[in-house]
Image (cartoon, grey):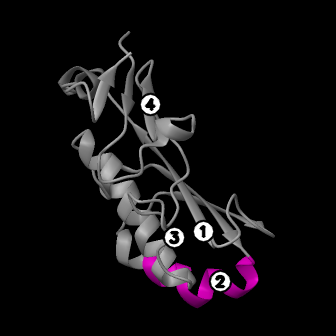
Amino acid sequence: MTSYAINPPELKDARDIGYNHARIDGGTFYMAGQVAMDADSAVVGDDIETQARKAYENVGILLGAIDKGYEDIAKVTTHIVDPAEHYYDGYKAVYWETFEEPYPCHTVLGHDQLANEDYLVEIEVEVPLSAADVEAIEPDGETIREL
């Protein structure tokens, strides 16, 4: 089965630091955790609501590359610094803006710190892909590369 690497130009070129933003292997969509980082590696926002909004925007960019949207997400894993403070005070409002019924499964994990001390949230999603979904992907050699 064909495998793809996904690295949209709207996101930092992750290959420069040793990973791909997303891969499709064996019909499964795998995504690196998305944070509040812009294409120039700058952290966007210093509060949980702003950072969550940017992280979900980055997730949306990745999904859009394969013609999927938030409604296609089956599972969300959210890593939050100090969830007792940030989950209900900021993050949850963005979650409610992003999703409608039927909601995805959602796991929230608390951390003392993420990869960069300025990050407050990191989000990963899982999207089931059918054989037709994978077959419809059109690699362009840049955003979507066949491996």
The residue that appears at 40% across and 51% down in the rendered structure is: 73
Q: Mark 4 or mark 2, which has the lower sequence index?
A: 4
Instruction: Please tell me how crowded label 2 is: few (under 14), some (14-19), or many (20+) other residues with Cα within 10 Å.
Output: some
Magenta highlight range: 82-94
Q: Seen from this angle, which residue lies furthest right?
A: 112
Label 2–label 1 contact, CB within 8 A = yes
The residue that appears at 45% across and 49% down in the rendered structure is: 74
Judge from the rendering whether residue 12 lies leftward or rightward of residue 60; answer left or right.
Answer: right
- Give the residue pinned by disc 3: 43
Instruction: Please tell me how crowded label 4 is: few (under 14), some (14-19), or many (20+) other residues with Cα within 10 Å.
Output: many
Q: Nearer the viewer, mark 2 or mark 1?
A: 1
Q: Secondary structure at mark 2?
A: helix
> Would residue 95 be visible to someone looking at this image?
no
Q: Quadrant of residue 89?
A: bottom right
> Is residue 67 on the magenta stretch?
no
- Mark-to-mark CA distance, 3 and 2: 17 Å
- The kind of residue tagged 4 is Arg
- The kind of residue tagged 3 is Val
